[in-house]
Image (cartoon, grey):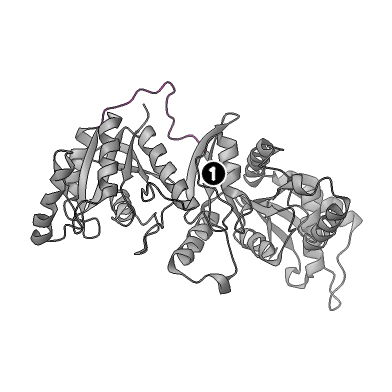
């Protein structure tokens, strides 16, 4: 059985995202007074009275527009209506019927799908009385609600689940199966949303040439070579000094939260621009969170046949990646499809490396071999010895190394030990941590 899909639709600024957050009982979607904040379809699990369903938040429906982003948002709304099993049409109780409301109503009547008409912002009896004019839409019963205050939400959900029917799905759903969370992050216009659309083979996310098109984190589930993967598309990360408006501020917070919750972060950069300082900040954020990491150099088709551009890129990469050479680098092109599936394959491998546990016997053999071949320098007349090691944590990997004088170990010795552990046991794309203890 798969969950029924309920899509929330309506014109801009009627409170769809506020209602979405109210139903799923957490602040998942960005909410702001300015219209047009939501752009992509955003999915979340919801439950009421023991009935589970998938709720979809959509952007504001704006027909007959010449704005490229508004056109894309409207296309996303139409796609949500097509895939939904039930449509929750939200209108504003305070403004009466608009032409856009009437057009959406026509679409619902032609769709032959069950729907519920909900008048939001009906915060008091006076507004409830004003909302009666919405019956002229000809969609039948009207549910009066306040998404912000919670008024009428219980009645709305009860009516909603009455209209839902269980849907047969061919495969059994194993809720306990592990899901690898892969965050797609990077600066604006690096091709993050384009990558997800290319992998899925559909226009799942809104893509334009305008930097900052994606504003909220959007989760997309797929199955890749027998493994469940959750791709998290994120808004482009910019320098703090360039983050001005509330929406962009919350977009940045959502992106940082996506990094905190993911298993592997794929950092997308533009091949024609090389690794900029902001890219290095993004990479450092991932390393600080001890997440798996993969550097994805997109738009490779723009420079692969240009020797001068390749030389500049390679020189830039060599300088910027010093000390973090364990991060895999992949050259892809979302436009041509070059190596796009290989990105997921590598991300799955990195997730496995991050979960890997090394037997203590193998670690201690390495420590003993190093003790015979390498002697840490004497400090303050004291001879420092490495005694034994054990792995005390995974996801991320954490190793405890015991010494007679751990406080005297130099940073160069600690980096050497990390490099030796990597050379022996791998951990490609995975930050590892070493703690030093006294026997």
Evaluate whether residue 426 shows in this view.
no
Q: Which of 230 and 74 is in front in this view?
A: 74
Q: Position of residue 363 (x, y in %)?
A: 75, 48
Q: Main secondary structure of the magenta part?
A: loop
Q: Nearer the viewer, residue 435 or 167?
A: 167
Q: Where is residue 107 in the image (x, y as percent from the top left)?
A: 30, 36
Q: Give the quadrant of residue 34.
A: bottom left
Report crowding for label 1: few under 14, some 14 to 19, many 20 or more residues within 10 A (C-alpha). Answer: many
Q: Is residue 401 left or right of residue 266?
A: right
Residue at x 31%, y 44% (from the top left corner): 8
Q: In this view, does 145 lie to the left or right of 391?
A: left
For disc 1, the marked residue is: 231
Residue at the limit of the structure toward the top, as seen here? 170
Q: What element carries label 1?
A: strand
Magenta stretch: give its range.
164-178
Q: In this view, does 22 lie to the left or right of 222?
A: left
Q: In this view, does 248 lie above or below 258?
A: below
Residue at x 12%, y 50% (from the top left corner): 133
Q: In this view, does 24 lie to the left or right of 387?
A: left
Determine if the magenta segment contains residue 15. no
């Amino acid at each position: 059985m798969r969950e029924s899909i309920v899509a929330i639709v309506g014109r801009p600024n009627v409170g769809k995202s506020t209602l979405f957050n109210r139903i799923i009982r957490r602040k998942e979607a960005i909410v702001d007074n300015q219209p047009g904040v939501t752009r992509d379809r955003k999915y979340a699990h919801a439950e009421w009275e023991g009935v589970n369903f998938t709720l979809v938040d959509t952007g504001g429906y704006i027909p007959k527009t010449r704005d490229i982003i508004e056109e894309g948002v409207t296309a996303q709304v139409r796609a949500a209506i097509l895939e939904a099993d039930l449509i929750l049409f939200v209108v504003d109780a305070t403004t009466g019927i608009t032409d856009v409301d009437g057009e959406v109503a026509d679409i619902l009547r032609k769709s032959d799908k069950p729907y519920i008409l909900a008048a939001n912002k009906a915060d008091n009896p006076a507004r409830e009385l004003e909302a009666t004019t919405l019956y002229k839409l000809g969609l039948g019963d009207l549910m009066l609600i306040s998404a912000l205050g919670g008024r009428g939400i219980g009645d709305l959900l009860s009516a909603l689940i009455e209209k839902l029917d269980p849907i047969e799905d061919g495969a059994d759903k194993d809720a306990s199966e592990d899901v690898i969370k892969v965050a797609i992050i990077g600066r604006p216009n690096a091709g993050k949303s384009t990558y997800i659309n290319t992998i899925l083979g559909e226009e799942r996310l809104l893509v334009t040439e305008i930097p900052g098109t994606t504003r909220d984190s959007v989760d997309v589930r797929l199955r890749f070579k027998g493994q469940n993967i959750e791709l998290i598309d994120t808004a482009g990360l910019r320098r703090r000094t360039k983050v001005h408006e509330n929406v962009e501020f919350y977009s940045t917070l959502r992106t940082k939260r996506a990094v905190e919750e993911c298993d592997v972060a794929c950092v997308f950069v533009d091949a024609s621009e090389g690794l900029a300082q902001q890219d290095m900040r993004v990479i450092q954020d991932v390393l600080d969170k001890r997440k798996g990491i993969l550097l994805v150099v997109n738009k490779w088709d723009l420079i692969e046949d240009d020797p001068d551009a390749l030389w500049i890129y390679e020189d830039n990469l060599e300088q910027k990646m010093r000390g973090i050479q364990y991060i895999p680098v992949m050259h892809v092109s979302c436009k041509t499809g070059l190596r796009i599936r290989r990105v997921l394959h590598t991300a799955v491998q990195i997730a496995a490396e991050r979960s890997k546990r090394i037997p203590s016997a193998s670690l201690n053999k390495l420590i003993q071999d190093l003790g015979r071949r390498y002697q840490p320098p004497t400090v303050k007349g004291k001879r420092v010895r490495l005694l034994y090691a054990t792995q005390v944590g995974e996801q991320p990997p954490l190793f405890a190394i015991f010494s007679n004088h751990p406080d005297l170990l130099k940073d160069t010795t600690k980096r050497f030990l990390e490099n030796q552990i990597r050379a022996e046991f791998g951990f490609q794309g995975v930050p590892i941590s070493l703690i030093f203890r006294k026997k």
